[in-house]
Amino acid sequence: MKVTVTVRPREGILDPQGEALRRSLTGLGYDVTDVRAGKVFDLELEAADEADARRIADEISERVLSNPLIEDYQVGA
Amino acid sequence: MMRAGVVVFPGSRDDRDALRAVELMGAEPVRIWHRDEDLGGADAVIVPGGFSFGDHLRCGALAALSPAMAAVRAHAEAGGPVLGVCNGFQVLTEAGLLPGILRPNASLRFRCHDAPLVVERESAWLPGAGAGDRLTIPIKHHDGGWFAPPEQVAELERRGQVLLRYAQNPNGSVGSIACVTNERGNVAGLMPHPEHAVDELLGSADGRVLLQGLLDLAGAPVAA
């Protein structure tokens, strides 16, 4: 079963990568006022059903894919 | 003789300097492979610098999941001393053994130079040093901005878990904090490299202070 996890920097947390991107985009003439850079994980996993897959993805996201101090995650596209 | 273990991950870079440094300090160096499930009888442990597992996902995140780190956790829970340097600091925060997390330098630039550090308080980790003393220890990192939420930083400061601050903040660390311990005081981490500062010939021998602290703590484990 395929599950997608999105990890984003938490609101209010400085994101140097996003800020560098924003500056570059501004340099190209785009009127972008904020960029937040995150990550997307496509997991292929064995699960009994969709709820079970979600539960496993939740556990993996909390334990490994995100660091709750600075990131939020979302299971599902 | 005191046995000082150094954990080696794929991508570790400073493990050999750390092994040599503890040997110079009079301890027997013990190399611990990341797949090892025990610490080879080490009384003290260093998690060294480098780019463990290619720094994929987040710096130190994958190394924190290794069997050797489970053994390091058990050692720390028994009161044994653990010192994390640079990537090792990142590994210990990701393992939940130290507070906070290391983020990309605010400048997004790799910083490689001597870093003057100010001693915050007397500590078993810094034998012979007092508040306000200065130590010069080199840094070389891209992801060394230490971060924790404001309420947690206040708590750490109150409990005396901050040992060193940067004289000039090189990486955007909150409160210019350079070195923190766990609540019990037997696990410490910092981005600067004590193992590179053990001989005046190389510019500074101030790193010996922390290494001596590590070995001292191994002789007198911290009670819970």
Image (cartoon, rainbow, N blue to C red):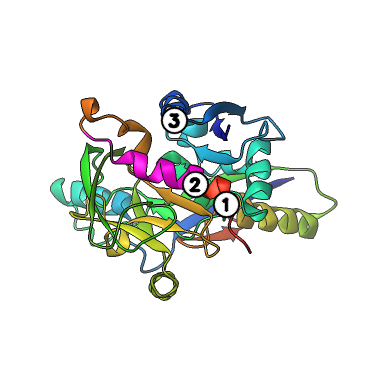
Quickly name the residue at label 2: B216
Q: Residue at x 23, y 41 (%)?
A: B109
Q: Is residue B133 above or below residue B12?
A: below
Whether the residues at callouts 2 and 1 have beta carbons within 8 Å, the answer is yes
Quarter of the image with the N terminus of chain A in it: top right
CA gap between label 3 and label 2 equals 17 Å
Q: Residues within 10 Å of mark 3 (few under 14, many from 20)?
A: many
The answer to which of A70 and B127 lies nearer the viewer is B127
Res B172 → quadrant: bottom left
CA gap between label 2 and label 1 equals 7 Å
| Horizontal side of residue A44 vs A36, given as left or right | right
Whole-percent x, y for residue B120 in the image: 30, 62
Indicate the chain on which mark 3 is placed: B
Indicate the chain on which mark 1 is placed: B
Amino acid type, label 2: Asp
Quickly name the residue at label 3: B18
Which contiguous range is marked in magenta? B204-215
